[in-house]
Amino acid sequence: MAVKKILRIGHPLLLGQSAPVTAFDAAALDTLVDDLLDTMKSRGGVGISAPQIGVSRRVIVFGAANSQRYPDMRPMPITVLINPEIEQTDNEIESDWEGCLSIPGMRGLVPRYRYIRYHGFDRRGKEIKQEAEGFHARVIQHELDHLDGILYPQRIENMCMFGFEQELNEYWR
């Protein structure tokens, strides 16, 4: 379909609550999903949400076979998740470095649940129920935050662990 402009931190649409999708047979939903997939792939991302391309709907896509941005990640299947919800499956929290297509060139050390269960719907309205752990779980939590107007710097506990990738790689990682 099309590679869309990604909204960056500071844009008010990134701070709002996204509306649920109610019509799964709509051509507009197919276009949105295709645009998200094209945009994510073109930027080398492993996840993206509808608000990041200016659409305030509860739609995320994630997945990649490999990633230059995250070379140690295990492959994740490309997944479309509409109206997603998550629940933690235990209390284990893991801190790791995150980046975001809406905050280019920066990273931060963010705590997230290591294990989650998620559910939602695919682009045709078929229910999806899965569990995820580690990086896979992190990506889903990150993208779900976008649907609730939360950007990863809001989750950082120690702002000394937030900065430009180049400096963090040189001095901290």
Image: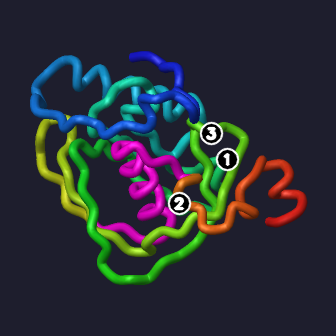
- Residue type for callout 3: Ile
Image quadrant in which you'd find residue 133:
bottom left
Q: Which mark is residue 36?
A: none
Q: Which mark is residue 68?
A: 1
Query: Whole-percent x and y of residue 106?
Result: 70, 46
- Residue type for callout 2: Arg
At 51% from the left and 28% from the top, the residue drawn is: 11
Q: Residue furthest right?
A: 170
Please identify, in this view, whether the residue under mark 1 or under mark 3 is nearer the observer: 3
Check whether the beta carbons of the residues at disc 3 and disc 2 lie within 8 A of each other.
no
Q: CA distance from mark 2 to mark 1?
A: 24 Å
Q: CA distance from mark 1 to mark 3?
A: 17 Å
Dot 2 falls on a residue whose secondary structure is: helix
Task: Examine the rendered structure and indicate whether residue 41 appears above or below residue 76.
Answer: above
Please identify, in this view, whether the residue under mark 2 or under mark 1 is nearer the observer: 2
Task: Examine the rendered structure and indicate whether residue 164 appears above or below residue 138.
Answer: above
Residue range highlighted in magenta: 131-152
Residue under label 2: 155
Q: Residue furthest bottom?
A: 91
Please identify, in this view, whether the residue under mark 3 or under mark 2 is nearer the observer: 2
Mark 3 or mark 2, earlier in chain: 3
Question: Label 2 neighbourhood size at 10 Å, few (<14), some (14-19), many (20+)?
Answer: some
Mark 2 or mark 1, earlier in chain: 1
Q: Is residue 106 left or right of residue 9?
A: right
Query: Whole-percent x and y of residue 158?
Result: 67, 67
Query: Whole-percent x and y of residue 103?
Result: 62, 39
